[in-house]
Image: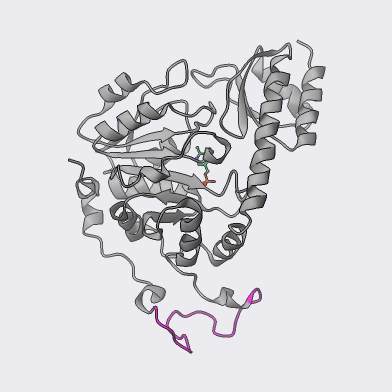
């Protein structure tokens, strides 16, 4: 049987978390002299002299309506990157535990593991970019705490087959994290509505991609109340600043505008695929459920440098195992994509 408490690090179980002034007094007062803030105000919007809500309840209420997940099941981080790091700090013992990643995938799972002195085991994805379930199963031992899944996956762009993900969720007794940073560009269903069925599930999403707010740094983790409780216990007290909370609240009212951007980016992506395929230096354009394309080139490095001379920068992934010779190209604005195609047509093999 899965029990979150068996996974929580011993020192975290016994931790008495920092209690801020905002935690200790939550009532309505007229005069706030409890937090050593500047009582006169600030040079900016006047309430920025005050510490922000440590648990961001207003923001979580609004997200709850959009996502269909109650606020108690939401943790907000300073980008998904904080949501990733805190899982290591809460659930993995340095020098002892290990996690599994399915390479090639997002780099931060491994970097955060290294920072936290957690061993990383790799189950490379198959040639069709799907999970190698047999390899995964063989890598699990009694110290495996987390399996990281990314769907749609960065940098391959594909979604993982749902039955494979369900197989992992049903059979692994540690945390299964599904990073859905690109889910809004995909036709596939999110795992958000499955939280009640899987106590070991953590779904990560972010405002950095479809919502167009990479600069705000707002990541979301959705999980059981028990997992969210661990997150809240170990997070920095004011990890989401007031400006981010204010601006995110404003942005979340613009769902229609965001859906329109998603529609345009997906249409541009689907327009780029056949046009890239007919170029002589392109070997393959892989199907994408995200806002980028993984493109195999005859000489990726040469194309990369050629584009750079035209002041167009793409991501060189040509030395990455399983995707050798590939560039990762983000879908741009319609004129940017036209310029990319024009530039590539000038490239001489
Ligand atoms: C871009 C990206 C993120 C976003 O990270 P933030 O810290 O929220 O900006 C998360 N996961 C994956 C796989 C990504 O590609």
Report x, y in % for residue 74: 41, 55
Left or right of 263, for residue 183: left
Q: Identify whether 187 is placed above or below 230.
A: above
Q: Is residue 239 visible?
A: no
Q: Work out which quarter of the rendered image holds the C terminus and state it.
A: top right
Above or below: residue 54 compared with residue 41? above
Type of secondary structure dominating the magenta stretch = loop
Between 97 and 3, the one lying in front of the other is 3
Left or right: 234, with 254 as reference point: left
Q: Residue at x 28, y 45 (%)?
A: 199
Q: Visible in this render: residue 269? A: yes
Foreground of the two, 339 or 261: 261
Would residue 166 appear left or right of 59 to someone viewing this image? left
Residue ranking furthest to the bottom: 30
* Residue at figure coordinates x 77%, y 35% from the top left: 334
Q: Is residue 43 left or right of residue 205?
A: right
Which residue occupies 77% across, 32% down?
A: 311
Looking at the image, is 211 positioned above or below residue 178? below
Colour pattern:
one colour
Q: Position of residue 250 (x, y in %)?
A: 61, 62
Quadrant of the drawing holding the N terminus: top left
Any magenta on residue 346? no
Q: Which residues are magenta?
A: 26-45
- Percent across and percent down for residue 28 are 43, 84
Q: In the rendered image, which quarter is residue 175 located in?
A: top left
**Residue 50: % across, % down:** 52, 76
Q: Count numbered badges in the picture.
A: 0
Residue 29 is one of the magenta-drawn residues: yes
């Amino acid at each position: 049987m899965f029990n979150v408490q068996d996974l929580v690090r011993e020192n975290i179980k016994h931790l008495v978390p920092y209690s801020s002034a905002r935690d200790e007094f939550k009532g309505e007062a007229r005069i706030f002299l409890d937090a050593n803030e500047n009582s006169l105000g600030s040079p900016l919007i006047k309430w920025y002299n005050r510490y922000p809500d440590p648990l961001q309840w207003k923001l979580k209420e609004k997200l709850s309506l959009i996502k269909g997940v109650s606020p108690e099941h939401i943790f907000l981080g300073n980008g998904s990157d904080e949501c990733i790091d805190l899982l290591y700090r809460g659930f993995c013992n340095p020098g002892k535990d290990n996690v599994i990643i399915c390479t090639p995938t997002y780099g931060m799972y491994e970097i955060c593991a290294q920072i936290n002195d957690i061993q990383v085991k790799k189950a490379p994805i198959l040639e069709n970019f799907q999970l190698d379930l047999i390899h995964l199963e063989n890598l699990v031992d009694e110290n495996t705490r987390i399996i990281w899944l990314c769907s749609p996956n960065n940098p391959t762009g594909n979604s993982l087959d749902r039955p494979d993900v369900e197989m992992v969720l049903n059979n692994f007794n540690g945390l299964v994290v599904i990073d859905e940073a690109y889910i809004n560009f995909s036709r596939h269903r999110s795992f958000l509505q499955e939280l009640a069925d899987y106590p070991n599930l953590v779904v990560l999403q972010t405002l950095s991609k479809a919502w167009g707010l990479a600069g705000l740094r707002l990541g979301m983790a959705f999980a059981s109340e028990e997992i969210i409780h661990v997150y809240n216990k170990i997070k920095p007290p004011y990890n989401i600043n007031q400006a981010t909370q204010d601006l995110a609240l404003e942005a979340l009212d613009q769902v229609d505008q965001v859906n329109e951007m998603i529609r345009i980016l997906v249409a541009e992506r689907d327009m780029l695929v056949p046009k890239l395929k007919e170029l002589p230096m392109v070997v393959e354009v892989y199907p994408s459920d995200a806002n980028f394309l993984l493109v195999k080139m005859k000489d990726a490095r040469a194309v990369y440098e050629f584009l750079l001379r035209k002041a167009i920068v793409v991501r060189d992934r040509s030395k990455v195992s399983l995707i050798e010779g590939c560039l990762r190209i983000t879908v741009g604005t319609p004129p940017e994509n036209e310029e990319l195609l024009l530039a590539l047509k000038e490239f001489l093999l």
